[in-house]
Amino acid sequence: MTDITAAQRFSSGTAVVTGAAAGIGEGLARHLARLGMTVVVADLDAARASDVARSIESQGGQSIARRVDVADAADVEEMAAEVFDRFGSVELLINNAGIESSGFLWEIDIPRWERLMRINVDGVFHCVRSFVPRILDSGTPSCIANLSSVGGVTTVAVQSPYIVSKHAVLAMTECLYQDLAILDAPIQVSAVIPHSIRSDIFLAARRESPTTNPVANAVFDAMQRDNVEKGLDPLAAAEHMIAQIARGDFWILSDDEMCTSTTTRRAHQLLDLSPPAHPRAMLERMGVALTEGQR
């Protein structure tokens, strides 16, 4: 950890942010552009990515849009080659692209499970595999920040695919940290643990993979409500998280109090070898009522 500020560390160079057309990714892209970086707004939604890039440019920043499907290894490889051909180096890679899904684990259909894992887990792997060798060849000090979640350090009912994927991203990030340490490579690795940042992720999950499970629907309704009412502004969250990345932290938290509380509960569960908590208390806080047969 150092005293370097985000304004010092990220005042120039190239940043690639996946899933940057909305939500957390958009907030990160906009903040990095304001600091002075050239930002590659990478997203599956080409139109929204272009809108974000144009908006950044209109505000005096430097940005390009790049449609990419992180689930497609060849597409990611092509993007990495184009970025390095154009800019010569990447000082910051943020693997943010991800989707949600709801329902009891056994109710998740196979195509949805596979798509979520291809985006949330394989997408991070594809970016690491395509960008790390080029970063090493360039010799430029860089950082790779992978978006896990508070869900990556705990477990939550009716969100199994997402939770599994975020545990995998956290494990992958810790392994990447250790692999690069063997090489003494000039690449910082950070695990980003967001709590609640305003986005459309819950709405998109309901739209793309609807479920008839009443508990899952009630939970996602409650999470969407809380996200709107209590979720952090993406730009404010980005500023807080980028400051931690600039310092060289491994653990990057969007909300220090909430994220630390979650990791502390997880630590106690593992130390005590306790089973997962019954979700009843969580559901009650959300205002979700269980029927007699669901208790």
Image (cartoon, grey):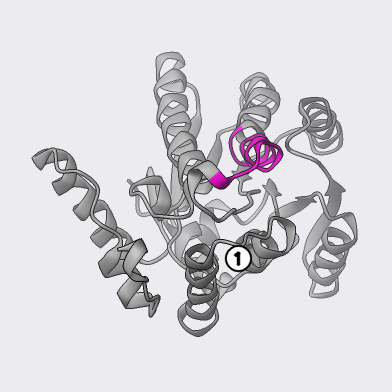
Residue at 74% over, 53% down: 39
Answer whether residue 63 is visible to the viewer in this image. yes
Q: Where is residue 85 in the image (x, y as percent from the top left)?
A: 85, 31
Residue at 42% over, 31% down: 171
Answer whether residue 256 is visible to the viewer in this image. no
Residue at 49% over, 44% down: 105
| Residue at the spot of label 1 | 202
Quadrant that contains the C terminus: bottom left
Disc 1 residue crowd, few under 14, some 14–19, many 20+, Cα 10 Å:
many
Can you say whether 284 is above or below 140 in the image?
Answer: below
9 or 80: nearer the eye?
Answer: 80
As for residue 177 lying within the magenta part, the answer is no
Q: Position of residue 175 (x, y in %)?
A: 42, 25
Per the rendered image, the range of residues in magenta is: 107-121
284 or 29: nearer the eye?
Answer: 284
Q: Residue 69's quadrant in the figure?
A: top right
- Horizontal placement of 278 versus 111: left or right? left
The rendered magenta stretch, by its main secondary structure, is classed as helix
Q: Position of residue 188 (x, y in %)?
A: 47, 35
Can you say whether 225 is above or below 249 in the image?
Answer: below
- Horizontal placement of 207 versus 282: left or right? right
